[in-house]
Amino acid sequence: MQPQSCFEMKQRTLKRAYEFEGKGLHTGTFSHMTLSPAPVDTGIVFVRTDMEDAQIPALAEFVTTTARSTTIAYGEAQAVTVEHILSALLGLGVDNAKISLDNLEVPILDGSARPYIEAITADGLEEQDAERRYVEIPEAIEIKDDESGSWVRVEPADAPSFDVTADFGSRVLGVQTAHWDEDVDYPCEIGICRTFVFLHEIEFLLSHGLIKGGDIDNAIIVVEKPVEQEHLDEIASSLGYHGLFVTPEGYLSNLKLHFPNECGRHKLLDIMGDFCLCGGRLRAKVTAYKPGHRINTNAAKAVRKLLTTASEE
């Protein structure tokens, strides 16, 4: 299913509810999540059913943490690792949806947006009796991070598009680029691309209380530095696996890549999810170099601030 054209002006929601469950990647908490239709002009909203149905609008001003994922919060209620489900909704053309969680973090599932895509595309979308709300900016915005060299530029355009360049200084990954616009098949080209991590980061992340729900079925593992098989066996064992090896391309043998630049495509998936926090379908050209959740969400916040300023003038 291709998303609707930018110039087809009706809002869309889901045809029915869908249920998902599993561990969160970073907190390790087990959550049940229900993705449901929502009325026109709702936008995307998270609901914590374990906290008296506390609602968290999926808007950039509610971002609180961007350590390895994007967290949004309203009052005491939080939703952790929201970017994959938001990316799926943006990529498929969903304007209005309710995402109900009975715990802290969105399930990581297979590390991509694929489970959401397969569920939603089986039924298609419900067209609603209201015009789509577009986010349009009056001028270009550029956000830079001098420390990392990252930057994100957002420019007015007739239709949404994203161009990403991922550069980790990695001998394995090299420099990877990825592109999406409304003519690109998001489900097959972007949404199936899984999250990734460098092998040398895993021990650090585990020691700092992150990736508690991670396993090697939901992440591509990049082996950047030489590693003795004995040490590799120890790390794999800590994640509950045995018999792994490093492929000639420099990846752990747990998964086979969908694309040579799957990691770059996943960074595109992530930024699309983070830019869903602009509050609607962004009619702009987004170009990013070395994107990450912090700079992505800072750029989305800048879009929201610019819109507020423009509306007050």
Image: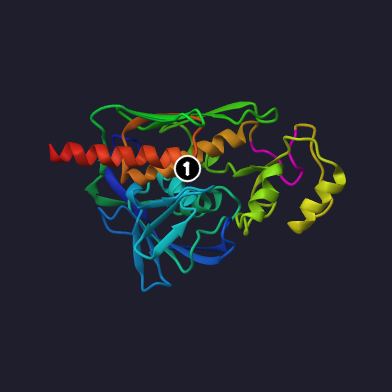
- The residue carrying mark 1 is 293
- Residue 237 appears at what percent x and percent y? 79, 56
Residue 74 magenta-highlighted: no
- Residue 10 appears at what percent x and percent y? 27, 45
- In the rendered structure, the answer to whether residue 281 lies left or right of residue 296 reads left
Front residue (pair 48, 161)? 48
The colour scheme of the drawn protein is: rainbow
* Rendered residue at 87%/48% (across/down): 230
- Identify the magenta region: 250-258
Q: Where is the C terminus found, in terms of image quarters? A: top left
* Rendered residue at 31%/52% (across/down): 43
Residue positioned most to the left: 313
Q: Quadrant of residue 136?
A: top left
Front residue (pair 109, 223)? 223
Q: Main secondary structure of the magenta part?
A: loop
Up/down of 219 relative to 209, above or below:
above
The amino acid pointed to by label 1 is His
- Residue 118 appears at what percent x and percent y? 53, 51
- The answer to whether one can see residue 2 in this image is no
